[in-house]
Amino acid sequence: MSGAALPRPFPLLLSSNHVPPPGRELLVLARQWSDRNVKVERLQKENAERPKVAFSTSFGKTGQHGPFHTASTVVFQNIFSNTGNHYNQATGVFTAPVRGAYYFGFTIGAYLHSTVMGLTLFKNEQQIIHTGEWGNHGQFRYASNTVILQLEVGDVVFMQLPANYRMFDDLHHRNTFTGFLLYPV
């Protein structure tokens, strides 16, 4: 023999540069898996620390409500969910726990016999949106509306039945008020 060293059949695994190609692919996959696990854990921690704010309610009283001579805050007493307990079931008022963008929606229903039905959504003392309908056809009608509002900590949102308006509810939960935090800002 000429004195040249014979190649080793299995090189020593001192670094990833010495790993045969299939082993190198496994090493790359293992690193990617580890990186993804770190990202998932980070996202789970961020999600756990995010405020959870959501409520969904219905009026909860059977029969005609209104008309009244003055506007009145509507207290939605049936609670489907109230994550964070920021909707007050006794007063009908939602109070923002964090600064953020919030979604609110409501539906109202009533039988219309020469009457008007409707609701107005307020932020603090400011009227934001109103939905209603007038009719003399004796049929049941619905009206709905939604809005996204930026709220500061302590801002309040509530529904008001305007003077001389009415609503009707029964076991079908026809009148609802819902809100949730989209994201903090």
Image: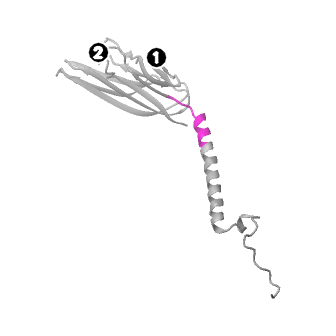
Residue drawn 29% across the image and 28% down it: 143
Q: Which quarter of the image is occupied by the C terminus? A: top right
Q: Mark 1: give few (<14), some (14-19) or many (20+) Cα within 10 Å.
A: some
User: As rendered, which of 20 and 125 lies closer to the eye?
Assistant: 20
Can you tell which mark lies on residue 28? none
Q: Going 29% across and 15% down the picture, which residue do you hit? A: 164
Q: Amino acid at mark 1?
A: Gln
Disc 2 residue type (three-letter): Asn
Quarter of the image where one finds residue 3: bottom right
Q: Which residues are magenta?
A: 42-53
The residue pinned by badge 2 equals 164
Q: Compare residues 13 and 47 and report the one nearer the observer.
A: 13
Query: Residue 91 location in percent, x, y?
Result: 46, 15
Quarter of the image for residue 145 reads top left
Residue at the left extreme of this rendering: 137
Image marks 2 and 1: residues in contact by CB distance under 8 Å: no
Dominant secondary structure of the residues highlighted in magenta in the image: helix
- Please say whether residue 165 is visible from this viewpoint: no
| 54, above or below 72, in the image | below
Q: Which corner quadrant holds the N terminus? A: bottom right
Could you tell me which secondary element the residue under label 2 belongs to?
loop
The answer to whether any part of residue 34 appears in the image is yes
In the rendered view, does 158 fall on the left or right side of 131? right
Q: Please, is residue 62 above or below residue 42 in the view?
A: above
Label 2, label 1: how many angstroms apart (C-alpha)? 24 Å
At a point 62% along the width and 55% down the height, the residue shown is: 32
Residue lying at the far bottom in this picture: please name it.
Answer: 2
* Magenta highlight on residue 178: no
Question: Mark 1 or mark 2, which is nearer the start of the sequence?
Answer: 1
Location of mark 1 (residue): 89
Q: Nearer the viewer, mark 2 or mark 1?
A: 1
